[in-house]
Structures are given as C-alpha cells and as structure tokens.
Amino acid sequence: MISTSRLRLRAYLPADVDERAAMFADRQTMRYYPRTKSRDETVAWIDRNLLSYERNGFGLWVVELKSTGEFLGECGLVVQKVDGAREIELGYSIKRARWGQGFAPEAAIACRDHAFEVLGLRRLISIIHPDNVPSQAVARKVGMRHEKDTQLFGLPQRIYSLDAPDMRRPCRPTSRSAGDAPDSVRATRRST
Ligand SMILES: CC(C)(COP(=O)(O)OP(=O)(O)OC[C@H]1O[C@@H](n2cnc3c(N)ncnc32)[C@H](O)[C@@H]1OP(=O)(O)O)[C@@H](O)C(=O)NCCC(=O)NCCS
C-alpha cells in the first residue's frame, strides 16, 4: 500500500505475530516503554490494529524490505489522548538487528506524507521518552519539533509535533497580482 525506495508498508496479518512478539520481548527495544509484552499481548496488539484500519482507515503497518520481504518492524498512525486532546501519533519501531540503517525515518516520512496528502490530517505528533535520543533523531528527520513535555503511560514523555503544510500559501514571493491563484491551484487547473 505505501511504498518507498527500499520499503513496503502493508497491513498486519495474523502470521506476523512471531516477528512482532520477538521485538516486544526484547528488553533493549522496549527500554523506553513501561514493560515488555507477551505473545498474547502481541496478538491483541495486531487485533487492535486490524480494528483501527476498519474504524479509522489507518493504523500501524508492517514495514518490510521490498527486495526480500524481510519483516523490519512497524510504522504508522495511532489515535492517542494527550492532555485531554485527541491526537494522531506517528509511531515507529524497528527490530534491533536493523537499527541505524535509516529505515524508521524512511517509513515515517512516507507515513507523514500519506497522513497529510491522502488522509487529509492536519497535525501529527510523536510521543517520545526524554532519554530516547534515537527516536527524537527520527522525529527531527520527519520535520517534527519538540512542542512540550507531559506524562503518559506512567512515564515522562516529550511531545514532538508537525502541522500539515498550508497549501494555500505560495512557497516563494512572485510578481503576480494578489488576485491570482496560487501555483498549486493553477497546476490543478492546467491538468484538468
Ligand atoms: C528509534 C528507532 C525507531 C530508530 O530506527 P532506525 O531505523 O534505527 O533509525 P535511524 O537509522 O535513522 O537511526 C536513528 C538514530 O538511532 C541511533 N542509532 C543508530 N544506530 C544505532 C544502533 N546500532 N544502536 C542504537 N542506536 C543507533 C542514532 O542516534 C541515529 O540517529 P542519527 O542518524 O542522527 O545518528 C529504533 O531505534 C527503535 O525501533 N527503537 C526501539 C523502539 C522505539 O523506541 N521506538 C520509538 C518509540 S517513540
């Protein structure tokens, strides 16, 4: 469904439980989460995502390597409640053997573009433990900024956020008169 140069993002299948459970059982991968998760909890996690695809048209998707089909982790969109407000979180998790190869930012940038351009969402956040430096690096690569600090899932968290680009605003000053349509609108008109 979502594709990048190296990656394919697809819906979870029940058969993904072994790969995802191995990530959830790994203490280093789960270092900044409240605790590791069991196999049964992994089954419930996949079920919750299948339900979210139906209800919201999005969820966390499996990230796999296009060339071999290898399971690399997950990336996608999750409804969260932060300080009383409904937010859509851009989340990502990559299996430890594949850290440091730029897979999380590549998948997250594709999800960001899908969220803004296809789903029409206006804002995304990421919820990141203050000590999770690798994840904050990913959030910055996606274009997010540290907005505020809060408490969630019983842990201190940094909220990173990004608003959808305003398509009505021209990218650069032009010499055309104020009544002219912006470039994006004119391009649409030309193609119709
Ligand atoms: C955070 C995470 C998704 C990053 O994924 P990734 O595909 O490795 O992303 P990148 O390759 O861009 O690396 C991101 C940062 O990880 C760090 N990193 C790179 N290789 C690493 C390694 N072998 N071990 C630990 N950290 C490493 C670097 O700080 C890097 O930032 P830089 O590129 O600015 O130097 C991944 O570490 C992960 O899944 N962690 C566990 C789950 C998690 O914390 N998810 C985010 C929850 S908010």
Image (cartoon, rainbow, N blue to C red):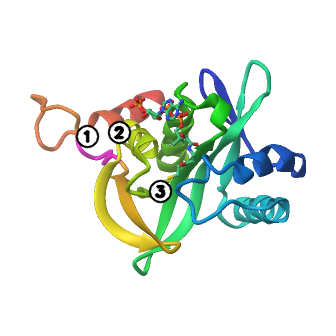
Q: The residue tagged with tag 3: helix, strand or loop?
A: loop
The x, y position of residue 169, in whole percent, is: 23, 44
Name the residue carrying label 2: 185
Mark 2 Cα within 10 Å, few/some/many (few <14, many 20+)?
few
Say above or below: 144 vs 39: above
Q: CA distance from mark 2 to mark 1?
A: 6 Å
Name the residue carrying label 1: 181
Q: At 57% across and 36% down in the image, what residue appears?
A: 107
The first of marks 3 and 2 along the sequence is 3
The x, y position of residue 11, in whole percent, is: 76, 47
Q: The residue tagged with tag 1: helix, strand or loop?
A: loop
Q: Is residue 48 left or right of residue 131?
A: right
Identify which amino acid the numbered label 3 is placed on. Leu
**Residue extending farthest top:** 67
Identify which amino acid the numbered label 1 is placed on. Ala
Mark 3 Cα within 10 Å, few/some/many (few <14, many 20+)?
some
Name the residue carrying label 3: 121
Is disc 2 in contact with disc 1, using a CB cutoff of under 8 Å?
yes
Q: Quadrant of the N terminus?
A: top right
Q: Is residue 159 left or right of residue 43?
A: left
Say above or below: 29 vs 100: below
Q: Which residues are magenta?
A: 165-169
